[in-house]
Image (cartoon, rainbow, N blue to C red):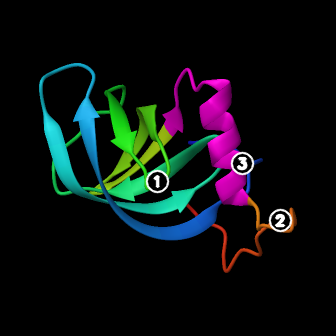
Amino acid sequence: MSIMRKRTVMRINVNWLVDMESLNKKQTISNVKVLTFSSGGLSFKCKEEIKVGESFIIHLPFASVPISVVRCLDDRYGALFLNVSLEEIDLIKQHLYKEDGQSILLESISQF
C-alpha cells in the first residue's frame, strides 16, 4: 500500500522548452518541457531516461537553478530545487506572482 502525501505548495502550469546539464556526468539534455512550476520545484517531460536522485542545472527562462529528480513516471519527472540562492528565490517568487503582487490564478493543480 502506498501513501500519497497531499501537496502543500501550489503549482503553476507552464509550457517552457529548456535545456539542463547533469551535475553527475558530462551530459546536456535539450528539449526538456517544463509542465508545472512552484516555489519548491517543478515537473517536466523528457525523452531521455533519468533516474530518481540525479541532479541537474536546469536553464529556466529567468534563471539557471540546480534540481534533484525525486519522481519518475514514464517520461514525466518531478524535481525539487537544490541549494537555491536568495537571488534565485527572489526570481522564482517574481515568476509566481503578477506585477501587482497578487497570486497568479491557477488553471489547474498538477497531479504529478
Report if residue 44 is visible in the image.
yes
Q: Give the range drawn in magenta.
A: 80-96
For the residue labelled by badge 1, is the local secondary structure a helix, a strand or a loop?
strand
Expressed as whole percent of the image width and height from the top left, the position of residue 26 reads 12, 24
Q: Which residue reaches farthest left?
A: 26
The mark that comes first in sequence, 3 or 2, is 3
Quarter of the view holding residue 13? bottom right
In 3D space, how far apart are the residues under numbered discs 1 and 2 (Cα atoms)? Answer: 20 Å
The amino acid sitting under disc 3 is Lys
Residue linked to disc 3 = 93
Residue linked to disc 2 = 103
For disc 1, the neighbor class at 10 Å (few under 14, some 14 to 19, many from 20) is: many
For the residue labelled by badge 3, is the local secondary structure a helix, a strand or a loop?
helix
* Residue 25 higher or lower than 4, as above or below: above
Q: Is residue 95 magenta?
A: yes
The amino acid sitting under disc 2 is Ser
Report if residue 39 is visible in the image.
no
Q: Nearer the viewer, residue 85 or 10?
A: 85
Q: Nearer the viewer, residue 60 or 15?
A: 60
For disc 2, the neighbor class at 10 Å (few under 14, some 14 to 19, many from 20) is: few
* Residue 102 higher or lower than 47, as above or below: below
Position of the N terminus, as image quadrant, is top right
For the residue labelled by badge 2, is the local secondary structure a helix, a strand or a loop?
loop
